[in-house]
Amino acid sequence: MKTGNDLGRDSVPSLVLKLAIPTMVAQFVNVLYSIIDRMYIGHIQGYGDLALAGAGVCGPIVTLLSSFGTLVGLGGSIQMSIRMGEGNTKKARQILSNSLLLLTLFSAVLTVLFLMIKGQLLRWFGASEQTFAYANTYLTIYTMGTFFALMAVGLNYFINCQGFPVIGMTTVLIGTICNIILDPVFIFGLDLGIAGAAVATVISQFLSCSFALAFLSFSKKVPIGISFGQYSLKVIGKILSIGLSPFLILASDNVLLIATNTVLQKYGGNQGDFLITTATIVQSYMLLITSPMLGISGGTQALISFNYGAANTRRVRDAEKYSLLLCFGFTTFMFIVTRFLPVHFIRLFTSNAEISRLSVWGIGVFTIAIIPLSLQYVLVDGLTAMERTKTALSLSLFRKSFYVLLVFLLPLIRKEATAVFYAQPIADLTASTISTIVFLLVFRKHLERREAAFRKNETAAI
């Protein structure tokens, strides 16, 4: 029975579905877990609200840690896919070996560094005297499991890029399902409170990491397995240069959260906390849309990179086209569903009628431009998959920089804190338009240069 996918020969529409759907599911389940995890913590007897606030402070720091797994995983897997497309399995094996070394080094350095500066980080991200102890407990335990977290995230990219998206999805599901099961056991059954939530998370990441390592080490189905040696500073530099764009994109998300909360607190007056709670609910809902979108665009990167490496530009164009169609279909569906779903979603977080009312309005505003946002996700990730990382990074950082600018300007113009919510659709629509224009200007020429370089290399080899 065929378990992998031939990225160079199988039908492109079929491959887009086979690669994107499992990644979409994995992303969605991850979001679902984070929501359920916060629900468990919030129900800890006696101090649930403070513990939830402490865990919330840790959220951006945890995201920053895991983004280093993306830095190496995505940077290395794109390089490996291109080399596999060229038929250079020796180079592909070297890239995986160097990526494994990088993940190990980053894990060691980040564990020591974050344990040393976690107090300053927590205060910077908003921990108060009341919430610091809970945040510190959670982050200390989580940081001790950094190796498992980075390996689980990073190695999964190398599973997906070799045509095994279902195995990649399984890696995520193992950790997520175990976490959902273990949370109540450690939090309530063993009465460990927020420390139990962190322990459950580390154990779950260990299981995901072990599964990914075992598959890449022992499975006879995977073309390029884990090996050691052939370490090269040049290869490491290339991995980091490709992965830098998605790393900065993920890491800069924290800046958006800090800016939004700061402005809401400043202009909200005595309603500041109320507005931040609303913004947290609205942003949580947006993750139900943007995370699967990331699954679609990220899931098809291996297909694009492989065929880009093989200079099969027709398949690259088709991959972009069908990925965009799938993303359009998903965002259109979510745009319609959003007109009915938010009320039920908001009830998971609050029973406060005023917060619920404002959250429904905020979700409606945030999702105005989600259909054109498909262009931003698919086209920018497509450029990254074709090694056009500087262009992709510039387009992504423009969207986020423009968003931050709007966050500070809109309340001044409209004289009310809730104007902040309009920053999302305005930034999304503007950035999507600019990204589309830039993509159309560079895409064809970039593929033509790839074809010319490939023919030149073939001629030199003869």
Image: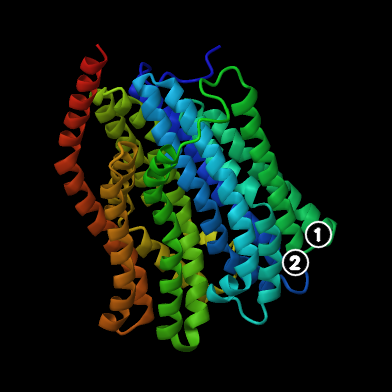
Q: Which mark is residue 44?
A: 2
Asked if 241 appears above or below 264 in the picture, the reply is above
Tell me if mark 1 has few (under 14), some (14-19) or many (20+) residues whose alpha carbon lies within 10 angstroms of its own. some
The x and y percentages for residue 339 are: 40, 56
Residue marked by disc 1:
188
Of residues 417 and 436, the one drawn nearer to the viewer in this rendering? 436
Q: Earlier in the sequence, mark 2 or mark 1?
A: 2
Mark 2 crowdedness (10 Å alpha carbons): few <14, some 14-19, many ≥20: many
- The quadrant in which residue 414 appears is bottom left
Which quadrant would the C terminus be assigned to in this image?
top left
Up/down of 23 relative to 394, above or below: above
Q: Position of residue 381 (x, y in %)?
A: 34, 43
Say which quadrant the N terminus sits in. top right
Asked if residue 312 is positioned above or below residue 120 in the image, the reply reads above
Alpha carbon separation for disc pair 2 and 1: 8 Å
The image's mark for residue 75 is none
Query: In this view, which residue lies farthest toward the bottom?
Result: 270
Q: Residue at x 38, y 35 (%)?
A: 301
Q: Are marks 2 and 1 in contact (CB under 8 Å)?
A: yes
Name the residue rendered at 46%, 62% in the picture.
283
> 317 or 345, which lies in front?
317
The amino acid marked with disc number 1 is Phe
Q: Nearer the viewer, residue 216 or 168?
A: 216
In this orientation, does residue 300 appear?
no
Give residue 296's position: percent from left, percent from top: 40, 39
